Protein backbone atom coordinates (compact mmCIF):
# COMPACT_ATOMS: atom_id res chain seq x y z
CA UNK A 1 0.00 0.00 0.00
CA UNK A 2 1.48 3.38 -0.93
CA UNK A 3 1.77 6.08 1.71
CA UNK A 4 -0.78 8.27 -0.01
CA UNK A 5 -3.45 5.57 0.33
CA UNK A 6 -2.24 3.92 3.57
CA UNK A 7 -4.57 4.50 6.53
CA UNK A 8 -1.42 5.07 8.63
CA UNK A 9 -0.73 8.30 6.82
CA UNK A 10 -4.21 9.82 6.82
CA UNK A 11 -4.97 12.71 9.19
CA UNK A 12 -7.20 12.26 12.21
CA UNK A 13 -8.46 14.47 15.03
CA UNK A 14 -7.66 13.31 18.58
CA UNK A 15 -8.32 15.40 21.67
CA UNK A 16 -9.09 18.39 19.46
CA UNK A 17 -5.70 18.15 17.70
CA UNK A 18 -5.40 17.56 13.98
CA UNK A 19 -2.84 14.76 13.76
CA UNK A 20 -1.19 14.65 10.32
CA UNK A 21 -0.87 10.82 10.41
CA UNK A 22 -1.42 7.87 12.81
CA UNK A 23 2.11 6.97 13.98
CA UNK A 24 2.41 7.89 17.67
CA UNK A 25 5.33 7.53 20.09
CA UNK A 26 4.48 5.00 22.83
CA UNK A 27 5.46 5.86 26.40
CA UNK A 28 8.98 4.66 27.18
CA UNK A 29 10.77 4.98 30.49
CA UNK A 30 14.35 6.10 29.83
CA UNK A 31 15.32 7.03 33.42
CA UNK A 32 17.33 10.17 32.77
CA UNK A 33 15.72 12.70 35.10
CA UNK A 34 17.91 15.11 37.07
CA UNK A 35 19.02 13.83 40.48
CA UNK A 36 18.15 14.49 43.20
CA UNK A 37 14.57 15.59 42.63
CA UNK A 38 13.49 13.39 39.67
CA UNK A 39 13.01 16.46 37.44
CA UNK A 40 12.73 16.45 33.67
CA UNK A 41 15.57 18.37 32.05
CA UNK A 42 17.06 19.88 28.87
CA UNK A 43 18.40 16.50 27.72
CA UNK A 44 14.90 15.03 27.86
CA UNK A 45 13.54 18.10 26.04
CA UNK A 46 15.97 17.43 23.20
CA UNK A 47 15.05 13.72 23.10
CA UNK A 48 11.33 14.41 22.79
CA UNK A 49 11.86 17.30 20.33
CA UNK A 50 13.83 14.91 18.10
CA UNK A 51 10.67 12.76 18.00
CA UNK A 52 8.18 15.61 17.47
CA UNK A 53 7.16 14.30 14.05
CA UNK A 54 5.14 11.62 15.88
CA UNK A 55 1.38 12.08 15.47
CA UNK A 56 1.26 12.22 19.25
CA UNK A 57 3.98 11.81 21.88
CA UNK A 58 3.11 10.02 25.10
CA UNK A 59 5.96 10.61 27.54
CA UNK A 60 7.59 8.03 29.73
CA UNK A 61 5.59 7.30 32.87
CA UNK A 62 5.90 10.07 35.46
CA UNK A 63 5.16 9.40 39.12
CA UNK A 64 2.37 11.48 40.69
CA UNK A 65 3.93 11.36 44.17
CA UNK A 66 7.06 10.06 45.88
CA UNK A 67 4.97 7.03 46.90
CA UNK A 68 4.15 6.36 43.24
CA UNK A 69 7.78 5.73 42.32
CA UNK A 70 9.17 2.27 41.63
CA UNK A 71 12.28 2.63 39.46
CA UNK A 72 15.46 4.67 39.69
CA UNK A 73 15.70 8.05 37.93
CA UNK A 74 12.13 8.19 36.59
CA UNK A 75 10.71 11.73 36.43
CA UNK A 76 7.99 12.96 38.77
CA UNK A 77 5.20 15.46 38.20
CA UNK A 78 4.36 16.58 41.74
CA UNK A 79 7.01 19.23 42.63
CA UNK A 80 7.50 22.76 41.30
CA UNK A 81 10.97 21.83 40.10
CA UNK A 82 9.52 18.92 38.10
CA UNK A 83 6.88 21.16 36.49
CA UNK A 84 9.63 23.58 35.48
CA UNK A 85 11.61 20.68 33.98
CA UNK A 86 8.63 19.36 32.03
CA UNK A 87 8.00 22.88 30.69
CA UNK A 88 11.33 22.61 28.86
CA UNK A 89 10.06 19.41 27.23
CA UNK A 90 6.63 20.70 26.16
CA UNK A 91 8.09 23.97 24.83
CA UNK A 92 10.68 22.08 22.76
CA UNK A 93 8.07 19.70 21.32
CA UNK A 94 5.57 22.46 20.57
CA UNK A 95 8.29 24.55 18.91
CA UNK A 96 8.71 21.66 16.47
CA UNK A 97 4.93 21.46 15.88
CA UNK A 98 4.36 18.32 17.98
CA UNK A 99 1.68 17.29 20.46
CA UNK A 100 2.51 15.74 23.81
CA UNK A 101 0.63 13.96 26.62
CA UNK A 102 2.32 13.01 29.88
CA UNK A 103 1.74 9.56 31.32
CA UNK A 104 0.65 9.72 35.00
CA UNK A 105 1.95 6.85 37.09
CA UNK A 106 1.57 5.23 40.47
CA UNK A 107 3.39 1.90 40.58
CA UNK A 108 1.60 0.51 43.67
CA UNK A 109 3.23 -2.75 44.72
CA UNK A 110 5.84 -2.70 41.95
CA UNK A 111 8.30 -0.81 44.09
CA UNK A 112 10.94 -1.22 46.75
CA UNK A 113 11.44 0.13 50.31
CA UNK A 114 14.67 1.82 49.16
CA UNK A 115 12.51 4.41 47.36
CA UNK A 116 10.42 5.06 50.47
CA UNK A 117 12.89 5.48 53.34
CA UNK A 118 12.47 1.81 54.17
CA UNK A 119 8.64 1.81 54.17
CA UNK A 120 6.79 -0.91 52.28
CA UNK A 121 5.25 -0.19 48.87
CA UNK A 122 1.44 0.06 48.89
CA UNK A 123 -1.25 -1.86 47.00
CA UNK A 124 -4.98 -2.68 47.06
CA UNK A 125 -4.10 -5.85 49.00
CA UNK A 126 -1.03 -7.27 50.72
CA UNK A 127 -0.25 -9.68 47.88
CA UNK A 128 3.27 -9.95 46.47
CA UNK A 129 3.81 -10.38 42.77
CA UNK A 130 6.21 -12.46 40.81
CA UNK A 131 8.30 -9.81 39.13
CA UNK A 132 11.14 -7.37 39.47
CA UNK A 133 11.89 -3.67 39.12
CA UNK A 134 15.04 -1.86 37.96
CA UNK A 135 16.94 -0.09 40.73
CA UNK A 136 20.40 1.37 41.00
CA UNK A 137 22.37 -0.27 43.81
CA UNK A 138 23.26 2.49 46.30
CA UNK A 139 26.64 0.92 47.07
CA UNK A 140 27.87 -0.06 43.62
CA UNK A 141 26.00 2.56 41.56
CA UNK A 142 25.11 -0.20 39.10
CA UNK A 143 21.55 -0.78 37.88
CA UNK A 144 20.04 -4.19 38.66
CA UNK A 145 16.68 -5.95 38.65
CA UNK A 146 15.46 -6.56 42.20
CA UNK A 147 12.60 -8.52 43.73
CA UNK A 148 9.81 -6.48 45.41
CA UNK A 149 8.55 -7.31 48.91
CA UNK A 150 4.96 -8.02 49.94
CA UNK A 151 3.20 -4.62 49.85
CA UNK A 152 1.07 -2.97 52.54
CA UNK A 153 -2.70 -2.73 51.98
CA UNK A 154 -3.96 0.83 51.48
CA UNK A 155 -6.65 2.27 53.76
CA UNK A 156 -9.69 3.95 52.20
CA UNK A 157 -8.40 7.37 53.29
CA UNK A 158 -5.09 6.66 51.61
CA UNK A 159 -6.86 5.61 48.39
CA UNK A 160 -8.74 8.92 48.37
CA UNK A 161 -5.47 10.78 48.89
CA UNK A 162 -3.96 9.00 45.87
CA UNK A 163 -6.97 9.99 43.73
CA UNK A 164 -6.18 13.54 44.77
CA UNK A 165 -2.51 13.06 43.86
CA UNK A 166 -3.66 12.14 40.33
CA UNK A 167 -5.81 15.28 40.25
CA UNK A 168 -2.93 17.48 41.36
CA UNK A 169 -0.54 15.86 38.89
CA UNK A 170 -3.03 16.58 36.09
CA UNK A 171 -3.13 20.23 37.12
CA UNK A 172 0.67 20.26 37.18
CA UNK A 173 0.66 18.79 33.68
CA UNK A 174 -1.40 21.73 32.47
CA UNK A 175 0.96 24.15 34.22
CA UNK A 176 3.85 22.39 32.48
CA UNK A 177 2.21 22.95 29.08
CA UNK A 178 1.13 19.40 28.22
CA UNK A 179 -1.72 18.89 25.73
CA UNK A 180 -3.21 16.23 27.97
CA UNK A 181 -2.50 13.34 30.31
CA UNK A 182 -2.60 9.58 29.90
CA UNK A 183 -3.41 7.74 33.14
CA UNK A 184 -1.25 4.63 33.38
CA UNK A 185 -3.86 1.95 33.96
CA UNK A 186 -1.82 -0.83 32.37
CA UNK A 187 1.15 -3.14 32.91
CA UNK A 188 0.37 -4.22 36.46
CA UNK A 189 0.71 -0.82 38.16
CA UNK A 190 -1.66 0.59 40.78
CA UNK A 191 -4.80 1.23 38.68
CA UNK A 192 -4.38 -2.20 37.09
CA UNK A 193 -3.81 -3.78 40.52
CA UNK A 194 -7.26 -2.55 41.60
CA UNK A 195 -8.90 -4.01 38.48
CA UNK A 196 -7.79 -7.61 38.98
CA UNK A 197 -8.92 -10.33 41.37
CA UNK A 198 -5.34 -11.62 41.43
CA UNK A 199 -4.02 -8.43 43.08
CA UNK A 200 -7.20 -7.06 44.69
CA UNK A 201 -8.90 -9.19 47.36
CA UNK A 202 -10.39 -6.29 49.30
CA UNK A 203 -13.78 -6.76 50.92
CA UNK A 204 -14.73 -3.04 51.06
CA UNK A 205 -16.11 -0.84 48.28
CA UNK A 206 -12.82 -1.06 46.31
CA UNK A 207 -12.77 -4.85 45.91
CA UNK A 208 -14.90 -7.89 45.12
CA UNK A 209 -17.47 -7.08 42.45
CA UNK A 210 -16.49 -5.74 39.04
CA UNK A 211 -18.03 -2.38 39.89
CA UNK A 212 -15.98 -2.22 43.08
CA UNK A 213 -12.70 -3.18 41.37
CA UNK A 214 -13.44 -0.45 38.82
CA UNK A 215 -14.13 2.18 41.49
CA UNK A 216 -10.53 3.41 41.76
CA UNK A 217 -10.19 3.76 37.97
CA UNK A 218 -13.48 5.65 37.82
CA UNK A 219 -12.52 7.95 40.67
CA UNK A 220 -9.14 8.74 39.11
CA UNK A 221 -10.64 9.40 35.67
CA UNK A 222 -13.38 11.55 37.22
CA UNK A 223 -10.91 13.56 39.31
CA UNK A 224 -8.53 14.16 36.42
CA UNK A 225 -11.24 15.03 33.93
CA UNK A 226 -12.95 17.37 36.40
CA UNK A 227 -9.60 19.10 36.85
CA UNK A 228 -8.46 19.46 33.22
CA UNK A 229 -11.40 18.36 31.05
CA UNK A 230 -12.27 14.90 29.75
CA UNK A 231 -10.96 15.86 26.30
CA UNK A 232 -7.47 16.10 27.80
CA UNK A 233 -7.80 12.89 29.82
CA UNK A 234 -6.77 9.52 28.38
CA UNK A 235 -6.00 6.11 29.85
CA UNK A 236 -3.77 3.16 28.99
CA UNK A 237 -5.03 -0.38 29.67
CA UNK A 238 -3.55 -3.85 29.19
CA UNK A 239 -6.41 -6.36 28.87
CA UNK A 240 -4.34 -9.39 27.88
CA UNK A 241 -1.46 -8.94 30.31
CA UNK A 242 -0.76 -12.09 32.29
CA UNK A 243 2.79 -11.44 33.59
CA UNK A 244 3.48 -9.64 36.90
CA UNK A 245 0.79 -11.64 38.70
CA UNK A 246 -1.91 -10.13 36.49
CA UNK A 247 -3.60 -13.26 35.06
CA UNK A 248 -7.08 -12.30 36.31
CA UNK A 249 -9.87 -14.48 34.90
CA UNK A 250 -12.34 -11.55 34.99
CA UNK A 251 -10.16 -8.88 33.38
CA UNK A 252 -11.72 -8.80 29.90
CA UNK A 253 -15.30 -8.13 31.08
CA UNK A 254 -13.89 -5.67 33.61
CA UNK A 255 -12.14 -3.70 30.89
CA UNK A 256 -15.22 -3.80 28.66
CA UNK A 257 -17.19 -2.30 31.52
CA UNK A 258 -14.48 0.34 31.93
CA UNK A 259 -14.83 1.11 28.21
CA UNK A 260 -18.54 1.90 28.65
CA UNK A 261 -17.72 4.29 31.46
CA UNK A 262 -14.88 5.92 29.48
CA UNK A 263 -17.17 6.39 26.48
CA UNK A 264 -19.82 8.05 28.66
CA UNK A 265 -17.15 10.23 30.28
CA UNK A 266 -15.92 11.37 26.84
CA UNK A 267 -12.20 10.81 27.41
CA UNK A 268 -9.64 11.78 24.74
CA UNK A 269 -8.66 8.20 23.90
CA UNK A 270 -8.12 4.70 25.22
CA UNK A 271 -4.63 3.31 24.68
CA UNK A 272 -4.35 -0.50 24.57
CA UNK A 273 -1.11 -2.28 25.33
CA UNK A 274 -1.15 -5.42 23.24
CA UNK A 275 2.31 -6.64 24.14
CA UNK A 276 4.60 -5.03 26.65
CA UNK A 277 7.83 -6.09 25.02
CA UNK A 278 6.91 -9.64 23.95
CA UNK A 279 5.00 -11.02 26.89
CA UNK A 280 1.29 -10.89 26.10
CA UNK A 281 -0.96 -13.30 24.26
CA UNK A 282 -2.46 -12.16 20.95
CA UNK A 283 -5.42 -9.83 21.11
CA UNK A 284 -8.50 -11.60 19.81
CA UNK A 285 -10.65 -10.00 17.14
CA UNK A 286 -13.69 -10.80 19.26
CA UNK A 287 -12.30 -8.61 22.01
CA UNK A 288 -11.42 -5.81 19.57
CA UNK A 289 -14.99 -5.89 18.24
CA UNK A 290 -16.50 -5.93 21.71
CA UNK A 291 -14.38 -2.99 22.78
CA UNK A 292 -15.17 -0.99 19.65
CA UNK A 293 -18.89 -1.65 20.18
CA UNK A 294 -18.60 0.03 23.60
CA UNK A 295 -16.04 2.72 22.85
CA UNK A 296 -16.50 4.82 19.72
CA UNK A 297 -13.95 7.49 20.61
CA UNK A 298 -10.26 7.26 19.50
CA UNK A 299 -8.43 4.02 20.27
CA UNK A 300 -4.64 3.91 20.27
CA UNK A 301 -2.94 0.50 20.11
CA UNK A 302 0.69 -0.47 20.74
CA UNK A 303 2.80 -3.60 20.89
CA UNK A 304 4.95 -5.25 18.25
CA UNK A 305 3.33 -3.41 15.35
CA UNK A 306 4.88 -3.17 11.93
CA UNK A 307 3.46 -1.28 8.99
CA UNK A 308 1.34 -4.14 7.64
CA UNK A 309 -0.23 -4.96 11.01
CA UNK A 310 -0.83 -1.26 11.70
CA UNK A 311 -2.62 -0.84 8.38
CA UNK A 312 -4.72 -3.91 9.14
CA UNK A 313 -5.84 -2.70 12.58
CA UNK A 314 -6.70 0.77 11.25
CA UNK A 315 -8.53 -0.49 8.18
CA UNK A 316 -10.63 -2.85 10.31
CA UNK A 317 -11.70 0.15 12.40
CA UNK A 318 -10.29 -1.43 15.59
CA UNK A 319 -7.98 1.53 16.21
CA UNK A 320 -7.44 5.12 15.11
CA UNK A 321 -3.76 5.57 15.95
CA UNK A 322 -0.89 3.08 16.33
CA UNK A 323 1.83 3.82 18.88
CA UNK A 324 5.33 2.47 18.37
CA UNK A 325 7.88 2.14 21.15
CA UNK A 326 11.14 0.38 20.38
CA UNK A 327 11.32 1.46 16.70
CA UNK A 328 11.40 5.10 17.87
CA UNK A 329 14.41 4.58 20.15
CA UNK A 330 17.02 4.56 17.39
CA UNK A 331 14.87 6.19 14.70
CA UNK A 332 13.80 9.65 15.91
CA UNK A 333 12.24 10.27 12.48
CA UNK A 334 10.39 6.94 12.53
CA UNK A 335 7.16 8.24 10.86
CA UNK A 336 9.17 9.36 7.83
CA UNK A 337 11.12 6.11 7.69
CA UNK A 338 7.90 4.14 7.84
CA UNK A 339 6.23 6.27 5.17
CA UNK A 340 9.18 6.11 2.79
CA UNK A 341 10.32 2.56 3.50
CA UNK A 342 13.71 3.74 4.76
CA UNK A 343 16.01 1.35 6.65
CA UNK A 344 15.62 1.19 10.42
CA UNK A 345 18.48 1.55 12.86
CA UNK A 346 18.55 -0.81 15.85
CA UNK A 347 19.09 0.37 19.40
CA UNK A 348 21.68 -0.44 22.02
CA UNK A 349 19.83 -2.23 24.84
CA UNK A 350 22.49 -1.32 27.40
CA UNK A 351 21.64 2.40 27.19
CA UNK A 352 17.83 2.11 27.42
CA UNK A 353 17.58 2.92 31.13
CA UNK A 354 19.62 5.65 32.77
CA UNK A 355 22.91 7.15 31.72
CA UNK A 356 23.91 10.04 29.53
CA UNK A 357 23.03 11.31 26.09
CA UNK A 358 24.73 8.22 24.63
CA UNK A 359 22.08 5.89 23.27
CA UNK A 360 19.57 8.69 23.88
CA UNK A 361 20.28 11.79 21.81
CA UNK A 362 22.83 10.40 19.37
CA UNK A 363 20.59 8.40 17.04
CA UNK A 364 20.45 10.56 13.90
CA UNK A 365 17.52 11.25 11.62
CA UNK A 366 17.84 9.75 8.15
CA UNK A 367 20.19 11.88 6.10
CA UNK A 368 20.47 9.88 2.87
CA UNK A 369 18.20 9.92 -0.14
CA UNK A 370 14.77 8.31 0.12
CA UNK A 371 14.76 4.58 -0.53
CA UNK A 372 13.01 3.20 -3.57
CA UNK A 373 9.24 3.39 -3.38
CA UNK A 374 9.00 -0.39 -3.40
CA UNK A 375 11.20 -0.91 -0.38
CA UNK A 376 9.22 -1.95 2.65
CA UNK A 377 9.83 -1.41 6.33
CA UNK A 378 11.12 -4.83 7.21
CA UNK A 379 13.62 -5.35 4.44
CA UNK A 380 16.65 -4.25 6.39
CA UNK A 381 17.84 -3.38 9.86
CA UNK A 382 21.07 -1.44 10.18
CA UNK A 383 23.18 -0.50 13.15
CA UNK A 384 23.04 3.18 14.06
C1 LIG B 1 12.43 1.00 27.13
C2 LIG B 1 10.95 0.86 27.31
C3 LIG B 1 10.31 1.57 28.31
C4 LIG B 1 8.92 1.49 28.47
N1 LIG B 1 8.30 2.28 29.40
C5 LIG B 1 6.94 2.35 29.43
C6 LIG B 1 6.28 3.31 30.25
O1 LIG B 1 6.90 4.15 30.91
N2 LIG B 1 4.92 3.29 30.24
C7 LIG B 1 4.20 2.39 29.51
O2 LIG B 1 2.97 2.41 29.55
N3 LIG B 1 4.81 1.50 28.69
C8 LIG B 1 6.15 1.47 28.62
N4 LIG B 1 6.77 0.62 27.74
C9 LIG B 1 5.94 -0.19 26.81
C10 LIG B 1 5.79 0.54 25.46
O3 LIG B 1 4.98 1.70 25.59
C11 LIG B 1 5.16 -0.37 24.39
O4 LIG B 1 3.88 -0.75 24.81
C12 LIG B 1 6.00 -1.60 24.14
O5 LIG B 1 7.36 -1.23 23.93
C13 LIG B 1 5.52 -2.38 22.91
O6 LIG B 1 5.58 -1.57 21.77
P1 LIG B 1 6.76 -1.78 20.68
O7 LIG B 1 6.70 -3.23 20.28
O8 LIG B 1 6.41 -0.83 19.56
O9 LIG B 1 8.04 -1.44 21.35
C14 LIG B 1 8.16 0.65 27.61
C15 LIG B 1 8.83 -0.08 26.63
C16 LIG B 1 10.20 0.03 26.45
C17 LIG B 1 10.84 -0.71 25.33
Image (tube, helix red, strand yellow):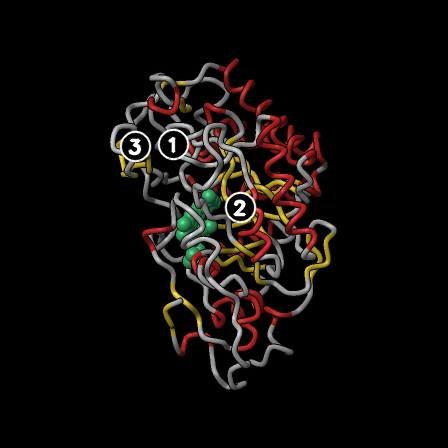
Residue 317: which quarter of the image?
bottom right
- Residue 86 in sight here: yes
Horizontally, residue 97 falls left or right of residue 280, namely: right
Callout 2: helix, strand or loop? helix
Q: Is residue 123 above or below residue 239?
A: above
Residue that badge 2 annotates: 44
Relative image position of residue 379 (x, y in whole percent) = 40, 79
Mark toward the start of the polypeptide (3 vs 1)? 3
Q: How many marks?
A: 3
Q: Secondary structure at mark 3?
A: loop
Q: Residue at x 32, y 39 (%)?
A: 244
Res 210 visible = no
Give residue 42's quadrant in the image.
top right
Q: Residues within 10 Å of mark 2 (few under 14, many from 20)?
A: many
- Residue 68 image point, x, y percent: 46, 28
Residue at 46% x, 32% y is: 35
Whether 195 is drawn above or below 5: the answer is above
Mark nearest the camera among 3 and 1 is: 3
- Sequence-earlier tag: 2 or 3: 2
Q: Nearer the viewer, mark 2 or mark 3?
A: 2
Q: Which of the pair 198/270 is nearer the observer?
A: 270
Which sits earlier in the primary sequence, circle 1 or circle 2?
2
On residue 197, the disc is 1
User: Distance from label 1 to label 2 (Cα)?
Assistant: 37 Å
54 above or below 102?
below
In the picture of the structure, the residue carrying the numbered disc 3 is: 129
Q: Are marks 3 and 1 in contact (CB under 8 Å)?
A: no
Q: CA distance from mark 2 to mark 3?
A: 31 Å
- Residue 38 at x, y = what percent? 49, 32
Judged from the image, the secondary structure of the residue bearing numbered disc 1 is loop
State if disc 2 and disc 1 touch (CB < 8 Å). Answer: no
Amino acid sequence: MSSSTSPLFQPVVVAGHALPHRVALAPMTRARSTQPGDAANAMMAQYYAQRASAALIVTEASQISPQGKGYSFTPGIYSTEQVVGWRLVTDAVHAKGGRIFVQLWHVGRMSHPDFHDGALPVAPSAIPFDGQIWKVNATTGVGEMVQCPTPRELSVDEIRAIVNDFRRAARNAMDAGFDGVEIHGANGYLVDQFLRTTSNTRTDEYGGSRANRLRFLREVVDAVSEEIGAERTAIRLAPFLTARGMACPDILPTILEAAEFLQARGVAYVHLVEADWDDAPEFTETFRESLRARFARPIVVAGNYDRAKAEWVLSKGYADVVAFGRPFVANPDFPRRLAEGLPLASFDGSTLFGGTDRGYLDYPAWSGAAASANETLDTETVEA
